[in-house]
Each structure stands twice: as structure tokens, then as C-alpha cells.
Amino acid sequence: MSVKEKEFAKLIKDNQGLIIKVSRLYTNTLEDEEDLFQEIVLQLWRSYDSFKGQSKISTWMYRVALNTAITLFRKKTKSPQTDELMDFHHGDYVEDDDEKQQHVAVLYKVIKMLPNVERAIVTMYLDDLPYRDIAGNLGITEVNARVKMNRLKKTLKDLMEKHA
């Protein structure tokens, strides 16, 4: 394995939670979630050389992951297979705490009810991305990102109470 591949593997391992969150929030079945996880890893690999370090690596990864999630099932095309990248499996990274998983499942359920852009805002907000990065990833202003998130907090609270 080359140095570049080792760096990339570490990057994926260190940021696997980000990829899992996006995969869960933009799919409805475990199979689709696993497919999206692998597609995101593939797209990250394809664009790895283009990362210039002008933003945090997690911000760049979110941008790639969200763009991949939003466009993947519209295209309905099969992704090319690669040997090294297919070694990353979604199931390797899922936690096994039942109570925590139940709470997370309810949260994902209500977040999935949101439109794509709002879903993305909440996902990045939960990962403590600054509003500047959220706005940059979505092509909106920082003020707009803040306003949307404040409105989404109330929406999520209402949905959690209704579905908990």
C-alpha cells in the first residue's frame, strides 16, 4: 500500500462517523446505507488529490459526502469497483450500544423527515461544524445557515416529542 493510500485509509478511519451519519440520513435501508458509505469513500478517493487544504479536512469531506448522497440515487448508475477502496465496509464502524442506538435511531428518523438541505445543516451542526463551514458547503450565507438552524431546532424538538 502506498503512502497516499495509507494516509487516505487513516483519514477514512478518523472520520468514519461523518460518513456513517450522512449515509444513514440519506438512505432508508441498511443495504443502501452500506452502498452509499462505499460510494462516498470512492468519491473521497477520487477527489483526494484535489484537496488543497484551504478548509478543514472534515469540511471538505462533508462537501463530498453530501454531494454524493444527494446525487447518488438520482443517477442510478453502478460505481466502478476498486480493490483497495472496497476494503472499507460500513459495518466495521457501527457502534454496538443498544440504548444509545435506540436514541440515535429516533434522531435519525426525525432528521430523515427533513428536506435534503435542512438534513445536511442538522448533520453538520451536530458535528460542531462552524456556521461558516456549513454555509460554504451548502452555498448559502452564514446568516442563512444560522437562521435555518435556529428554526430547525424547534422543528426537531417538536418531531422528537411526537416520535419518541
Image (cartoon, rainbow, N blue to C red):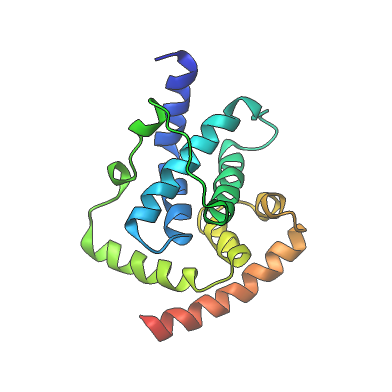
* Residue 147: % across, % down: 70, 70
Q: Residue at x 61, y 24 (%)?
A: 49
* Residue 105: % across, % down: 34, 67
Q: Is residue 53 left or right of residue 99?
A: right
Give the mark count. Answer: 0
* Residue 112: % across, % down: 48, 69
Q: Is residue 54 left or right of residue 162?
A: right
Vertical order, 157 against 33 (above or below): below
User: Furthest-top residue in view?
Assistant: 2
Q: Quadrant of the C terminus?
A: bottom left
- Report the front residue among 89 and 103: 89
Q: Is residue 19 left or right of residue 106?
A: right
- Report the front residue among 91 and 107: 91
* Residue 32: % across, % down: 39, 55
Q: Residue at x 45, y 40 (%)?
A: 15
Q: Residue at x 39, y 15 (%)?
A: 1
Q: Residue at x 63, y 63 (%)?
A: 117
User: Furthest-bottom residue in view?
Assistant: 162
User: Furthest-front residue in view?
Assistant: 77
